[in-house]
């Protein structure tokens, strides 16, 4: 590639804020020689030869949508919570190791079932607590930055003879 073509490519890439198509040696040589005083190398190892993994640049248009087009279905999610907790924990006895794994499994199942509702632009957070039922009391609290106009939650508490479970699903609108 001729020097004129390299300079032109460097100027175009500098306008875009990247000089990654030039090799790092060429950029350093130009900085040392003083031809291109303001240029800065942004070359990563992915841009070196031999790393030909294509990266797709996804461009999304602005929607200027400030609120949800469809509200989060709290009643439907409550039914999902009730169904999942009842099916998984109805006959279970409290065992610490088993319940530890069950919280992860139940969280993933609930999250998958809520995502199957395909509610656009909501971030779904699922938290499940399982504990031994032993005549004790427990308070569970949570905090987050909240917009009451669009964000919401759903909660369900379950009890059997040896354990209790609390499942919370938080739906935070993602602008």
Image (cartoon, rainbow, N blue to C red):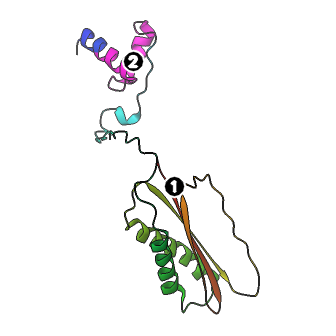
The location of residue 97, given as percent across then percent down, is 61, 80
User: Could you tell me which residue is drawn at 61 percent across and 51 percent down?
Assistant: 145
> Circle 1 sits on which residue?
150
Identify which residue, 79 or 25, lies in the foreground. Answer: 79
Q: Which of marks 1 and 2 is nearer the N terminus?
A: 2
Q: Which residue lies furthest to the right in this view?
A: 136
Q: Tell me the chief SS of the magenta region.
A: helix
The image shows residue 70, relative to residue 82, as above or below, that is: above
User: Could you tell me which residue is drawn at 41 percent across and 65 percent down?
Assistant: 115
The image shows residue 44, relative to residue 152, as above or below, that is: above
Circles 1 and 2, Cβ within 8 Å, touching? The answer is: no
The image shows residue 62, relative to residue 70, as above or below, that is: above
Range shown magenta: 9-37
Element under label 1?
loop
The location of residue 31, given as percent across then percent down, is 44, 12
Residue 18 magenta-highlighted: yes
In-image side of 1 versus 69 (left or right):
left
Spatial CA span between label 1 and label 2: 49 Å
């Amino acid at each position: 590639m001729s020097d004129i073509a390299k300079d032109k490519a460097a100027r175009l890439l500098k306008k875009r804020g990247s000089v990654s198509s030039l090799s790092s040696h060429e950029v350093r040589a130009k900085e040392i020689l003083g031809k291109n005083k303001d240029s800065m190398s942004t070359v990563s190892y992915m841009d070196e030869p031999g790393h030909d993994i294509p990266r797709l640049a996804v461009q999304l248009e602005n929607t200027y949508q400030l609120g949800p087009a469809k509200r989060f279905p709290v009643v439907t999610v409550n039914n999902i919570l009730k169904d999942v907790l009842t099916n998984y924990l109805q006959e279970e006895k409290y065992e610490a190791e088993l319940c530890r794994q069950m919280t992860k499994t139940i969280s993933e199942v609930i999250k998958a079932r809520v995502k199957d509702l395909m509610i656009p632009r909501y971030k779904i957070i699922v938290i499940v607590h399982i504990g031994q039922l032993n005549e004790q009391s427990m308070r569970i609290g949570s905090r987050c930055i909240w917009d009451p106009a669009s964000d919401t939650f759903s909660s369900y508490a379950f009890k059997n003879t040896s354990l209790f479970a609390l499942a919370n699903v938080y739906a935070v609108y993602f602008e």
